[in-house]
Image (cartoon, helix red, strand yellow):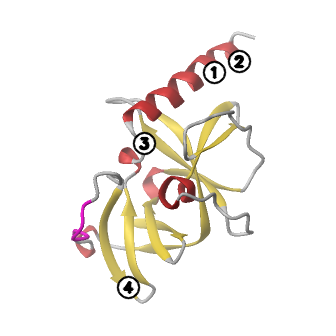
Amino acid sequence: MLLLLFHLDRDLYGLDAAQIVEVVPLIQLKQIPQAPRGVAGVFNYRGTLTPVIDLCELTLGRPCQRRLSTRVILAQYPVGETEKRLLGLMAERVTETTRKQASDFAPAGVTVDATPYLGRVAADARGIIQLVEIKNLLPVALRDALFREIAEADLCLSSK
C-alpha cells in the first residue's frame, strides 16, 4: 500500500493513499465559533463545504504550526454504510510517501481508548510509522455534528 507520511511532533504517521483525494497547501479556513476541540474550520473545496480537523490539536492539544510543509489532506471519510464525505486533515511535515505491505505492520502493543484511530505500526529507516485509520478518527457525536451541518449547508448552496 502507498502511505502518505506526516509528523505529530517527533512521531511519524501514515495514511493509506487510497483514501486520499488531494493534498492542498494550508489555506484560509472559516473558523467556527466554539467548535469542538480539533475542528480547525471549514473551506469551500470545489463547491463542497469541507470540514477540517487539526490533527495536532486533536492528538497533542496544540494547533498545527504554520509551516511550508503543513498541509490539508483531503480524505474520504465514511459516514454510513456506503456514503463518504470529504474531510480535511491538517497535519505538519506532510512531505513524502512510502510503500509498505500490510504484512509489514504489527499491533502497536498499547491500546488507548481515547485514540481508536491509531492503528498498527511498521519500522523502517525513518523509525516507526503508525497508521491512522480515517474511519475511526472522529467520535460519533463530532462526526454526526460535522456532517449534518455540512449536508444542510450544501442543500442551501445547491438551491440558490
Q: Residue at x 48, y 58 (%)?
A: 59
Viewer-nearest residue: 65 or 159: 65
Percent position of residue 61, x then y: 54, 57
Query: Which residue position is annotated with label 1?
Result: 154
The residue carrying pointer 1 sits among few (fewer than 14), some (14 to 19) or many (20 or more) residues within 10 Å by Cα, namely some
Q: Are marks 1 and 3 in contact (CB under 8 Å)?
A: no
Secondary element at tag 1: helix
Spatial CA span between label 1 and label 3: 21 Å
Spatial CA span between label 1 and label 2: 5 Å
Q: Nearer the viewer, mark 1 or mark 3?
A: 3
Viewer-nearest residue: 12 or 155: 12
Viewer-nearest residue: 71 or 160: 71
Identify the disc placed on residue 124.
4
Query: Which residue position is annotated with label 3?
Result: 138
Secondary element at tag 2: helix
Query: Which residue position is annotated with label 2?
Result: 157
The residue carrying pointer 3 sits among few (fewer than 14), some (14 to 19) or many (20 or more) residues within 10 Å by Cα, namely some
Going from N to C along the chain, the mark reached first, 1 or 4, is 4
The magenta stretch is 107-111
Q: Residue at x 64, y 20 (%)?
A: 153
The kind of residue tagged 3 is Leu
The kind of residue tagged 4 is Asp
